[in-house]
Image: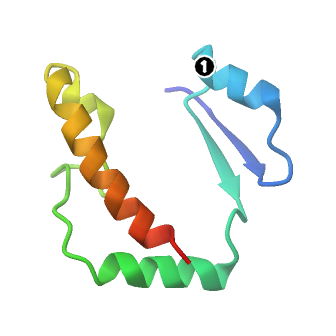
Amino acid sequence: MWNSIITTKNKIQNEDIKKITRGENSSIIIKKFYEKENCKKIIEKIRNTHIKKDSKKFNHIGPFLMNYTTKKKNISKKQKKQISHLKKFFQG
């Protein structure tokens, strides 16, 4: 399993992004990206929607790319739908 880069919003480096694109790391975890009150508002918005889970095994919102390794044509439709939901959660 790859390691994640753990940082804060003020410390993201170009090199971190390059490591992701080169496949050296799997993700960037950005601590304290939102203030706690903003997180609570987003969580409440998510709870008040009735979005179908994209996966039975994982608890996430949005297409999980590994679900589409054999169904690449389907991911574009799912992404567009999920992006509209994500915009609603993070607006305001």
Left or right relative to 62: residue 56: left
Which amino acid does the dot numbered 1 rest on?
Thr
Q: Find disc 1 in the rendering and name its residue.
A: 21
Q: Position of residue 24 (x, y in %)?
A: 63, 18
User: Which image quarter: residue 28?
Assistant: top right
Q: Position of residue 66 (x, y in %)?
A: 28, 30
Which residue shows up at 72% across the image and 65% down it?
32
Q: Element at badge 1? A: helix
Residue at 19% from the left image edge and 74% from the top image edge: 50
Residue 61 makes an appearance in the image: no
Q: Quadrant of the C terminus?
A: bottom right
Establish if 88 lies above or below 9. Answer: below
- Answer left or right for 40 relative to 75: right
- Residue 25 position in % (x across, y down): 61, 26
Q: Is residue 53 left or right of residue 15?
A: left
| Residue at image location 83% in from the left, 35% down from the top | 13
Q: How many marks?
A: 1
Q: Residues within 10 Å of mark 1 (few under 14, many from 20)?
A: few
The residue at the far top in this view is 22
From the viewer's perspective, tell me whether residue 62 is left or right of residue 28.
left
What colour-coding does the image apply?
rainbow
- Is residue 59 visible in the rendered image? The answer is yes
Q: Is residue 67 above or below residue 44?
A: above
Residue 11 vs residue 74, the one in the foreground: 74
Q: Position of residue 11 (x, y in %)?
A: 85, 47
Residue at horizontal 49 percent and vertical 26 percent from the top: 1
